[in-house]
Image: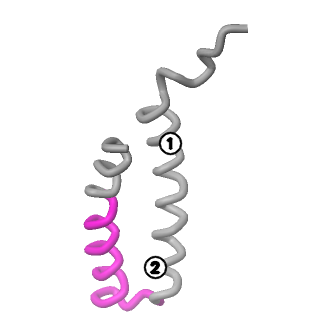
Amino acid sequence: MLKVAAFYAVFTPLTTVGGSFLADKLMWNAYLVEILSMVLNFITEYLYDRFVVFGKTIDTAVK
């Protein structure tokens, strides 16, 4: 659980600042920024969970 909290401790501020920059300074559509943020979260969290959080315990069941 601490590994997932560490992921969000980095991901949340980066997407908040980046999304603010895109929406406010570059005048991107706010819905587009939110959708991009959600897709980025989906992909990066899956990869982080798969390879970092559960990387050594996946496929270790004895048959």
Q: Is residue 36 above or below residue 29?
A: above
Q: Is 12 inside the magenta-drawn segment?
A: yes
- Residue at numbered disc 1: 47
Q: Which is in the foreground here, disc 2 or disc 1? A: 1
Q: Residue at x 53, y 53 (%)?
A: 43
CA gap between label 2 and label 1 equals 21 Å
Q: Is residue 25 left or right of residue 43?
A: left
Quarter assignment of residue 48: top left
Q: What amino acid type should be assigned to the residue bearing mark 2?
A: Val
Point out residue 7 in the picture as x, y percentages from the top left corner: 34, 50
Point out residue 12 in the picture as x, y percentages from the top left corner: 32, 65
Q: Is residue 3 left or right of residue 62?
A: left
Label whose residue precedes the other's in the sequence (2 or 1): 2
Mark 2: which secondary structure? helix
Q: Is residue 32 left or right of residue 23?
A: right
- Residue at numbered disc 2: 33
Q: What amino acid type should be assigned to the residue bearing mark 1?
A: Leu
Point out residue 30 in the picture as x, y percentages from the top left corner: 45, 88
Which residues, given as a range, are shown in magenta? 11-29
Q: Residue at x 34, y 42 (%)?
A: 3
**CB within 8 Å, label 2 to label 1:** no
Image label count:
2
